[in-house]
Image (cartoon, rainbow, N blue to C red):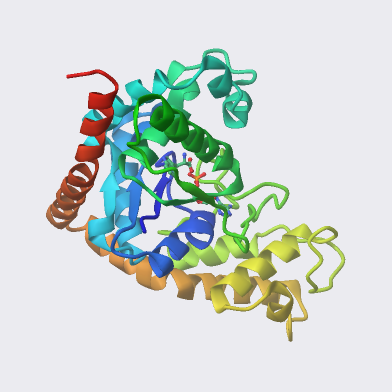
């Protein structure tokens, strides 16, 4: 059984990525799984090339530092010749209408002065990511479920039109996914590409910086440490984070805490503790570029080898070569 998922290096890995996705990939992953840095997906809006390269390496190091097997990790662009070949075949399997319907495209293109064509076609590349590797399960957040549905539809359509080449993947939306909110604005999801970093805890932030961000976290004036997400979203977020880092429910995490400052300190301590190992391993890897390059090359070779026969089969039945 192969699980596959990707993390887009559109910013630095943050606590939400870790608690909501990466930690689970590391804990539940098997040797057949694949987790990759989707750098091609970070090009759909304006970006800086040097920064993209650095963020890609950082995200790769974070995935390995989090404990995902190095052989299960790769960088998307390292196998882009195969991926873009399959993307073309899948673009000719999709319709304009079904791709233009994607909610994420509508949201990201609304109001934009210029819209890159890649922003529209990106879900087809995502389908290629999934179908090239024959993934059985694709764990993603809610916002990506429509894209996985598209991959399923394309796999079925291609298989019925041309021949049985692709595995139809299952969408897995983790039920108890921690939904980490921005510490400075609990109405928003914590996100790596937020314009304002004050409420975003990055995986590689120093303990001091983590503590400062928690001390400044927005709460409310109720002065009660209780888990009431609708009435007290800031406090609820701190309790969710504290609970997620200490293996308890948010309500359990509230036990014994009476002041907001104690809650902030406990949440900060728990996050610092939870991130300390991954932070150290990631920084060590980033300090050893030759080792990171070696891991990267091995992962790319593994992913290319796994996918190549499926690409060849797809090209053949589609009338190419
Ligand atoms: P993204 O940063 O949007 O590329 O997301 C990468 C992965 O991290 C996806 O599986 C998301 O669902 C997860 N993720 C991102 N932000 C959060 C958050 N604030 N809370 C929980 N999970 C998140
Ligand atoms: N688009 C996903 C995101 O932004 C990342 C991603 C790229 C992905 N390719 C994928 C996830 C394939 C699952 C499968 O979060």
Quadrant of the rendering where the C terminus is positioned = top left
**Which quadrant of the figure has residue 46?**
top left
Any part of residue 42 in sight: no
Q: Is residue 13 above or below residue 267?
A: above
Report the residue at 62% width, 30% height from top: 103
Of residues 170 and 116, which is closer to you in this image? 170
Any part of residue 40 in sight: yes
Image label count: 0
Q: Is residue 54 above or below residue 241?
A: above
Residue 49 place in picture, x, y as percent: 31, 29
Q: Is residue 143 above or below residue 14?
A: above
**Which quadrant of the figure has residue 155?**
top left
| Farthest residue, direction top | 113
Residue 50 place in picture, x, y as percent: 29, 33
Report the residue at 38% width, 48% height from top: 135
Residue 83 placement, left or right of 184: left
Quadrant of the rendering where the N terminus is positioned = bottom left
Of residues 269 and 295, which is closer to you in this image? 295
Residue 171 place in picture, x, y as percent: 52, 48
Residue 126 placement, left or right of 211: left
């Amino acid at each position: 059984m192969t699980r596959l998922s990707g993390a887009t290096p559109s910013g630095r890995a943050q606590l939400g990525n870790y608690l909501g996705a990466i930690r689970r990939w590391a804990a539940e992953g098997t040797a057949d799984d694949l987790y990759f840095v989707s750098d091609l997906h970070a090009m759909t809006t304006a970006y800086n090339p040097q920064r993209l390269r650095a963020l890609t390496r950082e995200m790769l190091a974070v995935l390995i530092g989090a404990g995902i097997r190095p052989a299960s990790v790769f960088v998307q662009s390292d196998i882009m010749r195969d991926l873009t070949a399959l993307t073309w075949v899948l673009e000719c399997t999709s319709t304009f209408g079904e791709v233009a319907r994607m909610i994420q495209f509508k949201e990201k293109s609304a109001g934009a002065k210029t819209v890159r064509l890649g922003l529209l076609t990106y879900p087809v590349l995502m389908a290629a990511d999934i179908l090239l590797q024959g993934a059985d399960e694709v764990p993603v957040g809610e916002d990506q479920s429509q894209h996985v549905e598209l991959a399923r539809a394309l796999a079925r359509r291609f298989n019925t039109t041309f021949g049985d080449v692709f595995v139809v993947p299952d969408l897995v939306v983790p039920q108890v996914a921690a939904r980490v909110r921005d510490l400075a604005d609990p109405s928003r999801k914590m996100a790596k590409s937020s314009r304002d970093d004050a409420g975003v805890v990055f995986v590689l932030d120093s303990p001091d910086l983590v503590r400062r961000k928690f001390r400044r976290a927005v709460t409310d004036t109720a002065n009660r440490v209780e888990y009431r997400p609708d009435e007290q979203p800031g406090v609820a977020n701190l309790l969710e984070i504290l609970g997620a880092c200490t293996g308890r429910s948010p309500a359990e995490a509230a036990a014994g805490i009476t002041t907001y400052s104690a809650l902030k300190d406990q949440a900060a301590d728990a996050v610092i503790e939870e991130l300390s190992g991954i932070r150290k391993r990631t920084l060590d890897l980033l300090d050893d570029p030759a080792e990171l390059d070696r891991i990267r090359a091995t992962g790319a070779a593994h992913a290319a080898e796994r996918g190549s026969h499926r690409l060849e089969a797809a090209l053949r039945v589609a009338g190419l070569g």
